[in-house]
Amino acid sequence: MIVLLKILHLLALIFGSIASLGNIYLGFAKGPHDLAAPDYTNTLRKFYRLTGLGAIIVLWITGVMLMFSKYGLWVPGSAFKAKIIFALAITAVVLFVNLMSPGWARRGGPPSYLPAVTWIGFISLVLVVVFAVAAFG
Ligand code: HEM
């Protein structure tokens, strides 16, 4: 059971990082002329944001289950605390983008600050992995 949970935890990490990088690469577009197929670009945005949402949900479910089954109610140590803080930051980014994007679509596209938000999510993801390894060895 624990092995299965950890496999799912790490698979969700793969899916989440693909979604995160995909959004960063879309953010490199210098303007609409770089995104010649707007419908497909919007489909990609939707795939990435739903992949990210699914990934963070699975990460929380499997993460909490791993914690309870291996360590109890909490994992002692500042590395795990830092891991959870950055996991919360990613969760905030993913929820924000998923909640706001229908409104952005109605108004003709995402706001100019979206690439900064996706960078915050990506850097937090890297830090979560660093602190996860620091916490669990
Ligand atoms: C963005 C979210 C997350 C990412 C990227 C992530 C990543 C990772 C990684 C890479 C490991 C393997 C570390 C190692 O074995 O050296 C790990 C393990 C673990 N994670 Fe997460 N995690 C996330 C969220 C969470 C959450 C929310 C919790 C709990 C509330 C959690 C609990 C755990 C536990 C308990 C382990 C240790 C499993 C073991 O001892 O075998 N994770 N995580």
Image (spheres, helix red, strand yellow):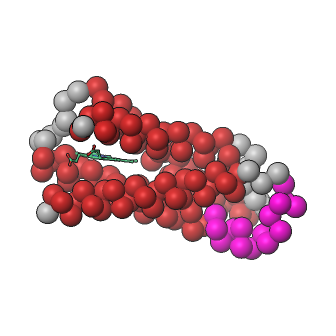
91, 59: nearer the viewer? 59
**Residue at position x 35%, y 35% in the image:** 131
Residue occupying the far front of the picture = 137
Residue 25 % position (x, y):
67, 54
Count of labels in the image: 0
Is 120 displayed left or right of 11 in the figure?
Answer: right
- Report whether 13 appears left or right of 36: left
The structure residue drawn at horizontal position 80% and vertical position 64%, both measured from the top left corner, is 35
Q: Quadrant of the C terminus?
A: top left
Magenta highlight on residue 122: no
Q: Is residue 50 above or below residue 80?
A: below
The extreme top residue here reads 78
Can I make out residue 99 in this image?
no
Task: Give the residue drawn at x 64%, y 68%.
Answer: 44
> Predominant secondary structure in magenta?
helix
Quadrant of the rendered image containing residue 45: bottom right
Picture coordinates of residue 130 (x, y %)? 39, 37
Q: Which quarter of the rendered picture does the N terminus lie within?
A: bottom left
77, above or below 130, in the image: above
* Residue 14 image position (x, y, % from top left): 43, 58
Relative to 128, is 8 above or below?
below
Image-based side of 130 in relation to 101, left or right = left
Residue drawn at the location 18% of the way across and 37% of the way down: 74
Q: Could you tell whether 3 is left or right of 18 in the image?
A: left
Res 65 visible: yes
Magenta-highlighted residues: 31-45
Question: Where does the image place residue 41, in percent across and percent down from the top left?
Answer: 71, 67
